[in-house]
Each structure stands twice: as C-alpha cells, then as structure tokens.
Image (spheres, rainbow, N blue to C red):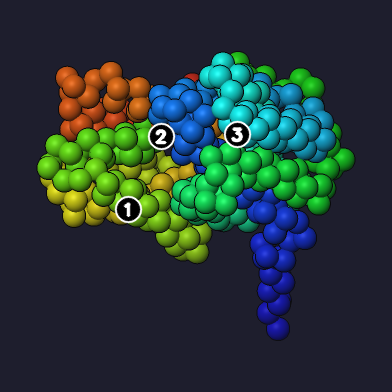
Amino acid sequence: MPPSAPPPGPRLRDLPHWTAWNVAVALSRIQPAMADLGLLLAGQAATGSLAGGGVLVGAYTLTRTLCGPLAASWMAKRLHRRLQGGLLFSALGLLALAAAVLEHLSLPWLVGLTLLAGLLPGGVSGGLFSMLGDLVPERLRGRALSIDATLVELVWLSAPLLVTASLGWLGAPGPVALMAISALLCAAAIRSLPDKAALRPVSRGQGRALKLLRQLWPALLISFSSALAMGMMTVCLPAQLQADGTSVLLAGPLLSLFSLASGVGGALFSGLGQRWQGSVLGRVAALLGALGLGPLAMSLAHSPLADGAVLILFGSTIAPLNGLSATALMQWSGESERALAYALSSACFGLGYGGAGLLLAKLLGQWGAGGLLGLAGAVALASVPVCLLDRRSGLLKALGRG
C-alpha cells in the first residue's frame, strides 16, 4: 500500500491566538484611520477654523510618522508590557485633547496634547506585526498577512462612519474620545496574547535603524512609491473633478469605492493568491507596476464614471500589494528586527502619502492634477526596476524563496 498522506496542518482559524491578534490589530488601526477627519473636525470646533484642524492633523501625522521607528525600537525590548504602556499613554493624551476641545483651549495647548497622543502609537503596529512570527506557522504567514491587509482596508473604510457616529453622540470631542477608547480596548486585547519575550528572547545586537535602512531600502522604496501613488490619486481626485466641471462632493463616494475595491481585492487574493507562483519580490514588483499605472490612467480620465472605473480597477491591487510587502519584510528582517522594520516601512508609507498632499499644495497651480498624477505614476513605475535590479543588498536572494 502506498504511504498515507501526512495529516494537514492547522488552519488559521484553528490557531489559538489568531482571532485575538486580529482583534488587537483592528483596534490598533482605528486611531490612525480616524485621525485625519476626526482631528480636523475637532480642531475646527475648538478654534473656529479648518486651518486649526489642519494643524492638529499635521502635528499628529508628523509625530506618528517620525517617532514610529523610535517607538518600535523602544517597545521591542519589553514588547508585551510596552505595547500596552504606549497605548495607555496615547489614550490619556487623547482624552486630555478631547477635554481641551470641549473647553475650547487655545491652539498651542491643542497642538501640545496632539503631539503627546501621537508620540508612541506609531510603534504599535510594528510590535503586533513582530508577534505574528510566533503565533502563525511560516506556511500560513503569507495568507495571514493578506487577510490583515484586507482588514486594514475595512477599518479605513469604516473610519468616516465612526467619526460621524461619534460626532452625533458626543459632539466635537466625540471622535477624539473614540480614538482613546480604541487604544484602551487594544491594550486590553493585547493582554490576551502570549508575551513574545517569553517565547523567544530578543537579541540585543540587532534591531538598529541604520542597519535596516541599508538592508531594506528597496522594500522601503516600495512602501514610499506605492503610498505616493495612492495618496496622489486620493488628493488629486477633487481637483480632477473640479477641472472637469463636476461637483467635488462626488470625491467622497468615489474614494469609498477605492477603499472597497482594495478590500475586495485583498479578500480575493487571500483565497486565490496561492495559485500565483513566484518569488515574493517578483509579485510585489508586478503589483507595484500595476498600481503605478493607476495615476497615469486617472490623469487621462475626464468624467466621474472614468475616475470611478480607474479607482475600482487599480484600487483592487492595494491590499494584495500591502500584504505581500509585509510578507517580504517578515522574510528579510531578523526576529528582533521585525517591529522596527515594520515601523520604518510605515514611516516611509506615511512620508509618501503625506508627500502627495504637500506636492498638491505646492505644484497644483503649475502642474495641474494631471501632471501630479503622472509624476506619482512615474515614480512607482521607476521603482520597479530599481528594486528588481538591486543585487548589493541581497534582497532578491533573500526574498526569492517566497
């Protein structure tokens, strides 16, 4: 008789901490997803102008982006305890900010509290990312990260609804208070996860930002260029609609379709992506190239229907690209480096997304929406051969196993 086939390994839903990890990850993403609109409206209510709200959004985003790698490095030393401590610190800052909004304190007070609230959350996602290596077997990590990327899109899709609901319930401080509550709930969810330090001691000689920058710069370039493409499609849409003589109010529904398409693409990829053979880096490069065509196609669209078709078609690549990029980071970074690697990637993503807004503010009058979209698409497409042809960092050899 032929030997019997080995029994199948556990499925994701059978793993003891898989559900708890997803709950913690979803709760950790609520705060940054709500921040742009929530802080904008809270700042407007407190100061009487949208400019004041914009200052709060910029302060939070800049602090979270720049301090994220430092926060991740600090948390990695005592991951379980410091993840919870960072979330509690952020929640206290947000609750104080909500009270300041309620009392209409001056803008310097609001900015100071916003800076405190954004100081540590940038390291939380990296810490949770590093836990995944202990919770999920290697053969299931690609699918797990694809599901995580889909979950991210669903959280971002629901964020405007959460802002609206909390405004109706608690008024202007409502979104900020809900951001604080999500941080507290995330800290509670992390308590149910096993302490990573107890499973595998962290090596003290690793996890340095400069070393990771040298090793991972192609992966970080992918994060930056993909974020620039996504961000430019997002911020240029109202200008594109206005130039075509269409109401900018259509930007909201069209961008909801953008996020929805990404979530659907991620769900399909998590179920069918195993049929796509090839190295992780090769698949990342293919998806980045496809996404890079999105801004170029959008620059040629001259109607809301065409804009919507472009957003749906190319938005479907975002969650699969993010999931595969996270898989690449996990394969290439060492055990004790993963939290910092993810935080660096998130920082590059934030710089790309924020850079799209800065370029719009600076160059829209000279270049127009079409020119800026063309620039973002060209950067994304140019990043593909740069990453694929790189040999010195060993990235192709390391990621080619996937």
Residue at x-position 35% and y-position 28% = 356
Q: Which residue is mark 2?
A: 227
Q: In the image, residue 206 lies at what x, y percent?
A: 72, 23
Label whose residue precedes the other's in the sequence (2 or 1): 2
Residue at x-position 50% and y-position 64% = 271
Amino acid type of the residue tagged 3 in the rendering: Leu
Q: Which residue is mark 1?
A: 253
Dot 3: element: helix
Q: In the image, residue 367 lies at what x, y percent?
A: 17, 23
Label pair 2/1, CB-CB below 8 angstroms:
no
Q: What distance separates the C-alpha of mark 2 from that of mark 3? A: 34 Å
Q: Residue at the right extreme? A: 198
Number of the label disc, if any, that sits on residue 102: 3
Q: Residues within 10 Å of mark 1 (few under 14, many from 20)?
A: few
Amino acid type of the residue tagged 1 in the rendering: Pro
Q: Nearer the viewer, mark 2 or mark 1?
A: 1
Residue 209: name its quadrant: top right
Q: Residues within 10 Å of mark 2 (few under 14, many from 20)?
A: many
Residue 359: name its quadrant: top left
State left or right for residue 189 relative to residue 368.
right
Dot 1: element: helix
Q: Is residue 129 above or below residue 71?
A: below
Q: In the image, residue 158 lies at what x, y percent?
A: 49, 53
Q: Is residue 69 visible?
A: no
Q: Is residue 342 above or below residue 119?
A: below
Residue at x-position 28% and y-position 18% = 362
State left or right for residue 238 relative to residue 30.
left
Amino acid type of the residue tagged 2 in the rendering: Ala
Q: Is residue 207 visible?
A: yes
The quarter of the image holding the N terminus is bottom right
